[in-house]
Image (cartoon, rainbow, N blue to C red):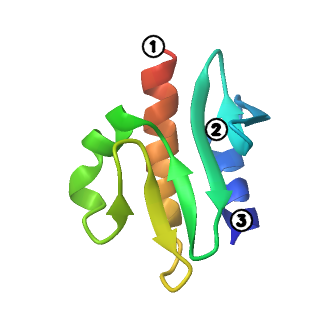
Amino acid sequence: MLNKVRDTLRAALPDAEERISWRMPTYWKKKNIIHFAAFKNHIGIYPGDKAMEHFSDRLKEYKTSKGAWQIPYSKPLPLDLITEMARWCYETANN
């Protein structure tokens, strides 16, 4: 599952650099764009608070916090939404 998330983010953000930040895989272009990580019961996506607010209506079925989104292993990966969110974060961060 993590490889699918990584492949999705790489395809969505071809100009971004892969780094480790906050001990998580991170996509960076002049600043952090989006992070992700695996935990015991979920994959965490960390796009930041502005993205969480922007996409809040599409994240209602997930556990979220101010800057994070949890995707339980029991649910399919919403790769299209991850792509859209990553591109939105990139555009917002680099404008």
Task: Give the left or right position of residue 11, taking residue 44 as reference.
Answer: right
Q: Secondary structure at mark 2?
A: loop
Give the numbered dot on residue 95.
Answer: 1
Q: Which residue in the protein does label 2 denote?
A: 13
Verify CB contact (< 8 Å) between mark 1 and mark 2. no
Q: Mark 1 is on which residue type?
A: Asn
User: Which one is earlier in the sequence, the residue at label 3 or at label 1?
Assistant: 3
Does any portion of residue 93 appear in the rendered image? Answer: yes
Q: Earlier in the sequence, mark 1 or mark 2?
A: 2
Q: Percent position (x, y) of residue 92?
A: 42, 24
Residue 7 on image: x %, y %: 72, 57
Q: Secondary structure at mark 1?
A: loop
Give 57 or 39, whichever is nearer the viewer.
39
* Three-letter amino acid code of the residue under disc 2: Leu
Q: Residue beneath label 3, please?
A: 2
Which quadrant is the N terminus positioned in?
bottom right
